[in-house]
Amino acid sequence: MKLKLKNILSVSFCLILLLSGCKEHETKNEETTTVIPFTAFSKDYENSVSYSGYAAADELKRFSFELSGKINKVLVEKGDIVKSGQIIATLDTQSIQMAVDKAKQDISLAKNKISQIDVSINEINIGLEAENLTLQKAQTGIDAEKISLDKIRETYNSSINKLQLQYDNAKENLQNTESLYSRGVCDKNTYDSVKLAYDTVSEELENAKQSMEKDLSLQEKKIENLEQDYSLQETKIKDIENKLEQANVQKQAAQISVNQAQIALEQNTKYLSDSSLKSTINGYVVETPMKSGEVTSAGTPVVVVKSGNEVVNVSVPTEDYSKLAVGMETKLTQDNKEIYGKITSIDLYPDETTRTYNVKITPSENNVFALGSLVNVMISLDKENSVFVPISSIINVNGIDYVYCIIKNANGENTVVSKEIKISHTDGENVCVDGIDSGTVIVKNEVKNLRENQKVTVKEGEPIEK
């Protein structure tokens, strides 16, 4: 019984608190704040991107000699106007001219030597041709004598063969006669006659063999002598061929000398040409780092020339690269200077270090900015219709932006409701927003003190601004 009473008291107490809270809330809702109204408006807004660039010469050339040497004369001074092709400095060419003259002399001497060698080669070739003809004749003589040798051998062999046959017959006849004579069948006169015939043919056979041996020996000796002469002729021709080879080697060496001297001549002739330093652009002299009489090295700047045109270089990130195009209008500002320009070039490839693209902008006027100075660059992309509200009308809660819209409740009273927005860019005291429409009436001030659905009093006598 006591527990139930306690519970009833607790519930009663809670109800009193709730009623008290509701009454307090109702009282608060009835509080009003005086606000200044503002009508969100729309207008065409120029969409653009901005960067920091730096002023530079459209072309800044550091002219230097391609060879080392003593500067004869620097022909321009700082501030001088120069034209493309104008000689701006010269080198001392005394040593170069001496090298040119020596190369020409070396070429002349080497060519004269080649001419002399050609005469000698021609004479050697004529002599070689004659000696080869003599060698051919010698070979022909040897061949003829060998043919004669074969004929002698053939002739003697034919005669000896006949005599040998006669000898064999005479010998056989003698043997038969001796047999008959020893038996007394034939007389001595017959025997002597047969014996004489045998001795005669035997002597003729022996004489024929001796004559053949002698004649063959003489002919072979003759051939041997001719072959020795032929060998000597070959040696003579070999000596002439060696002389011809030596002459050709000398000619090749002389030709190498000509080629080397020709290279030296071309090189030093180029040095003579390079000894005159010429400007390749129209512009004016910015600096002359080297003076007349000083010794310069190849590649060391002697005269620095700036072209008459000035550009502003801008590094553009990858996300903006596709938005830009050659010919786009730009606005260039620096301190109190403001001029227009156009994009004249966009690099095809990004810088390997920064991964940005260099964009070159040509100002509408020259020599406005100091070289190397920073320049603010705004590049117009396009125009779009956007809704604008005052910066003072925006409140941020937990990272989300809101505005309070003024509406009429069911009782016809002015109340406010929050509307989430997104800010895209600013334009002076106003900001471009997404999330509300043009013509929406919002609270311009005191937004931090407002609550959702709070009744407000629109400031009397204040027109709805636009």
Image (cartoon, rainbow, N blue to C red):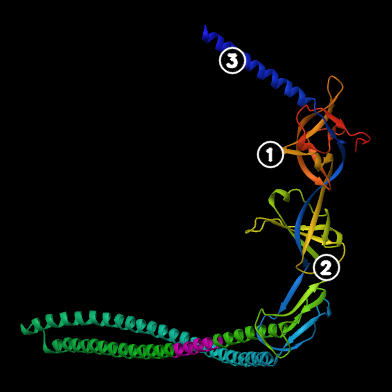
Q: Secondary structure at mark 2?
A: loop
As drawn, the label of residue 309 is 2
Q: Amino acid at mark 2?
A: Asn
| Measured Cα–Cα span from mark 3 to mark 2 | 91 Å
As drawn, the label of residue 10 is 3
Q: Is residue 84 visible?
A: no
Q: Secondary structure at mark 3?
A: helix
As drawn, the label of residue 95 is none
Q: Are marks 1 and 3 in contact (CB under 8 Å)?
A: no
Q: Is residue 248 magenta?
A: yes
Q: Is residue 307 magenta?
A: no
Q: Which residues are magenta?
A: 236-251
| Image x and y of residue 428, in percent | 84, 48
- Which residue is situated farthest in the left direction here? 183
Camera-near label (1 vs 3) is 3
| Left or right: where 252 falls relative to 140 | right
| Image x and y of residue 128, in percent | 51, 88
Q: Secondary structure at mark 1?
A: loop
Q: Amino acid at mark 3?
A: Ser
Camera-near label (1 vs 2) is 1
Counting residues from the N terminus, which is met first, the one under dot 1 or under dot 3? Answer: 3
Q: Are marks 1 and 2 in contact (CB under 8 Å)?
A: no
| 376 or 267: nearer the viewer | 376
Counting residues from the N terminus, which is met first, the one under dot 1 or under dot 2? Answer: 2
